[in-house]
Amino acid sequence: MNVDCGVRIATDEVVRLVRELHANDQIRKSDQG
């Protein structure tokens, strides 16, 4: 079904956003010391 493909793409987008946020968090922490 096409729905599964849409869900998979949406999940990939969410995972990518979470990873970016996590990376930004790590950068902020390293900047603070």
Image (cartoon, rainbow, N blue to C red):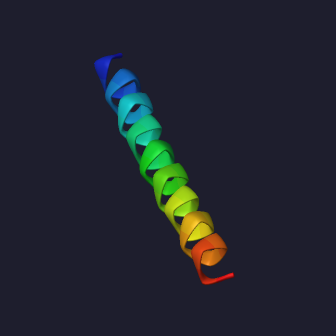
Residue at 54 percent across and 73 percent down: it is 28
Q: Is residue 4 above or below residue 25?
A: above
What x and y, as percent, mark residue 32? 61, 83
Quadrant of image for the C terminus: bottom right
- At x 42%, y 51%, the residue is 17
Q: Whole-percent x and y of residue 6?
A: 32, 29
Q: Is residue 28 left or right of residue 10?
A: right
| Camera-side residue of 22 and 14 | 22
Q: Quadrant of the N terminus?
A: top left
Q: Residue furthest right?
A: 33
Above or below, 5 relative to 23: above
- Name, please, the residue furthest toward the bottom: 32
Residue shown at the point (65%, 71%) measured from the top left: 30
Front-lying residue, 28 or 9? 28
Say whether residue 3 is left or right of residue 28: left
Corner quadrant of residue 4: top left
- Vertical relation: 2 (above or below) 22: above
Number of numbered labels in the structure image: 0
Q: Residue at x 46, y 43 (%)?
A: 16
Q: Nearer the viewer, residue 11 or 26?
A: 26
